[in-house]
Image: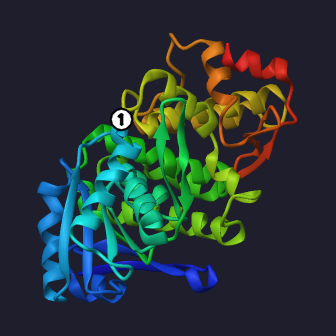
Amino acid sequence: MDIKHKLTVELGARSYPIYIGTGLLGQAPLLGPHIKGRSALIVSNTTVAPLYLAAVQQALDAGTTRHDSVILDDGEQFKTMASVESIIETLLQRRHDRRSTVIALGGGVVGDIAGFAASIYQRGVNFVQIPTTLLSQVDSSVGGKTGVNHPLGKNMIGAFYQPQCVIADIGTLGTLPARELSAGLAEVVKYGLIYDAEFFAWLEQNIDALKAGDTNLLAEAVLVSCRIKARVVELDEREAGLRAILNLGHTFGHAIETAMGYGNWLHGEAVAAGMMMAIDLSLREGWIDESVRSRASALLQRAGLPVAPPADMTTRQFLDVMAIDKKAVDGSIKLVLLRALGEAFVSADYDQDKLLQTLN
């Protein structure tokens, strides 16, 4: 076991550690202290379970923790209330009590579903995140957002619910398909764009090695990304203001995912295209210069990501889906935009005609 980095999300009584390293799966001394009761339910999917379920079960066996498992189908299209109900049904059938722990083993979809189930079972049971994709390690496993999709909008049903800990084993990234790794890099690039221009420059220097799977560099990228997200979440846990900057590109991106059908565009791919649309609008407003757009576009393309939305998606489709986005308030669509590289803000005070130009 090699814990390369450890940091804490400071939220008072809800504070929790993030462990980043290699060989962390299957380590009872690491997982055990975060299992509060004597039973656990592991939630995974058909792709991840054959690779890593046995290691987590071994760690629970070493701690004499009774455990069951639920294996979901793999894909964004299964991020539904039906999946949540299957978890609840197993918890009830196997007589898990209020001291049971739900363990999410997988990517962002598994983490969001399992976390939401944990938040509502007997009004909330313990929850542990073991993210196995880059996107989930740098983004969805940290911060307590859980939930599922609705046919009319992404992540429209959910709750804020913090885990007991996050165990990010960089070794699991070695089994990711190249497309999934690239999708995770979209969220990494996001942190540079919204918060840290120096980190963005570091990514420009190291993106090829990151895409090739360099373990040490990936651990560093996960650390910096989690550190930035932790800072923002500590200041605004329930997204009353500042935390919304973490959604750069997401309003556009969620519209793409919804309109194209969940799972056809990976979340990170849609976010990459959405970030470029937010940057385009920021440029049209005169808040940034062309160099920001050209650098962002070049970096995302080197990461293997799209920089434009689907060619067959209409302006009307965008507007219809964006109108029911969670950041839409009193009929106005709030967007995350840039004032400079590394400086984001949230506003509905932009020129509607310029938004239409971006969408067109």
Q: Quadrant of the N terminus?
A: bottom left
- Would residue 163 appear left or right of 55 to someone viewing this image? right
Give how far across and how far down residue 228 sits, in percent. 60, 65
Residue 182: quarter of image: top left
Residue 302: quarter of image: top left
Q: Nearer the viewer, residue 107 or 200?
A: 107
Residue under the image location 65 percent in, 58 percent down: 196
- Give the residue number, with chain letter if any, for mark 1: 77
SS class, disc 1: helix
Give how far across and how far down residue 279 sits, in percent. 69, 33
Residue under the image location 66 percent in, 72 percent down: 234
Residue under the image location 42 percent in, 74 percent down: 125
Residue under the image location 51 percent in, 12 percent down: 311
- Would residue 37 appear left or right of 307 to someone viewing this image? left
- Would residue 340 appear left or right of 38 to someone viewing this image? right
Asked if 28 appears above or below 246 in the picture, the reply is below
Give how far across and how far down residue 159 sits, in percent. 55, 58
Asked if 209 appears above or below 253 in the picture, the reply is below
Q: Residues within 10 Å of mark 1 (few under 14, many from 20)?
A: some
